[in-house]
Image: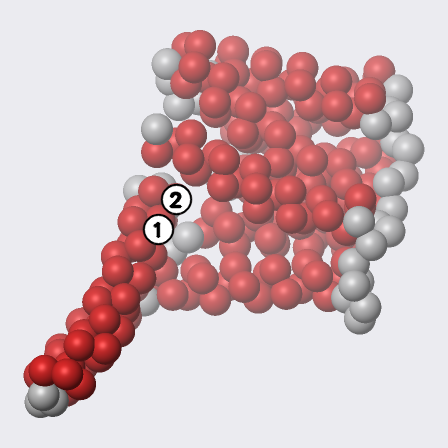
Amino acid sequence: MKEIYRKIVHLGLSSLLICPFILHLPEPLDIRVYYSLGLLAAALINSAVVRRSKLRVELENFSSELHKFVDSFGEKTRMPLAVIEEAIDEFHGFIERQLSLLERDYEKREGYVGLLYGMIGAVISLLVDPCHTFYGITALAVVDTVASISSMAIWHRGKSLGGEAVAFLVYASLLVVSGSSALQAIVVSLLAVVSEYFSPEDNLTVPVVATTTAMLLGAPPHCPL
């Protein structure tokens, strides 16, 4: 269940990266600013996760001081302040639960690198070729999500060749529908799936591999709006 939740969030965040290709961004945003802000946000989140132990201590100290402050007032004044204190505690608990669901075991030690590497991969893809970045972002959204969920649903494993085969078929079909030739779709999908299966950090490599391959094969461009 935890892995499915992670993949749903992964798909949602990847969909945000596809937005510039299907929607006009409001001024003064363009795709470079949009992706740069996403990279900044990912870096800040990763930094917060890395420092989570220190932040937890700071928050506990703040909560303790707030509790003493609340107790120093009379009953009538204490009530609204107690509500604020409870809200802070609930918010902290909510953030902890979401991070626990999202992060993998090594990310508990090293930070939420999946999000950060995904944004780095997206930015590199944009630098490679903005009009073929669409291929990399759709690969980021589809390949890992489909491979993981199908592996768990059918083969009851976290990663399997069967799941990769399903991801290959789904992504290749999506590329054909979006205008690629059968050969282009097969080659881009195959390399994206191989990258996803063997890479130590697929969020970083999959979008770059798919974007670069699509560009080299002369796949139909899908430029940002």
Q: Residue at x 76, y 62 (%)?
A: 32
User: Residue 221's quadrant in the figure?
Assistant: top right
In the rendered view, tell whether residue 214 sits above or below residue 223: above
Q: Residue at x 49, y 17 (%)?
A: 150
In the rendered view, tell whether residue 56 sits above or below residue 112: below
**Screen quadrant of the N terminus:** top left
What residue is pinned by disc 2?
Answer: 102
Amino acid on which disc 2 is placed:
Leu
Is 79 displayed left or right of 175 in the figure?
A: left
Q: Residues within 10 Å of mark 2 (few under 14, many from 20)?
A: many
Q: Residue at x 82, y 54 (%)?
A: 24
Amino acid on which disc 1 is placed:
Leu
Q: CA distance from mark 1 to mark 2?
A: 5 Å
Q: Residues within 10 Å of mark 1 (few under 14, many from 20)?
A: some
Is 93 displayed left or right of 216 in the figure?
A: left
Q: Secondary structure at mark 2?
A: helix
Answer yes or no: is residue 196 visible: yes
Residue 167, x across and y down, in percent: 60, 20
Residue 74, x across and y down, in percent: 9, 88
Q: Residue at x 42, y 30 (%)?
A: 4
Work out whether residue 76 or residue 219 is closer to the camera in this orientation and state it.
76
Residue 99 image label: 1
Q: Tell me whether circle 1 and circle 2 mark residues in contact (CB < 8 Å).
A: yes
Is 156 displayed left or right of 122 in the figure?
A: left
In the rendered view, tell whether residue 151 sits above or below residue 20: above
Is 134 displayed left or right of 86 in the figure?
A: right
Residue 154, x across and y down, in percent: 44, 10
Answer yes or no: is residue 205 visible: no
User: Residue 95's quadrant in the figure?
Assistant: bottom left
Work out whether residue 164 or residue 5 is closer to the camera in this orientation and state it.
5
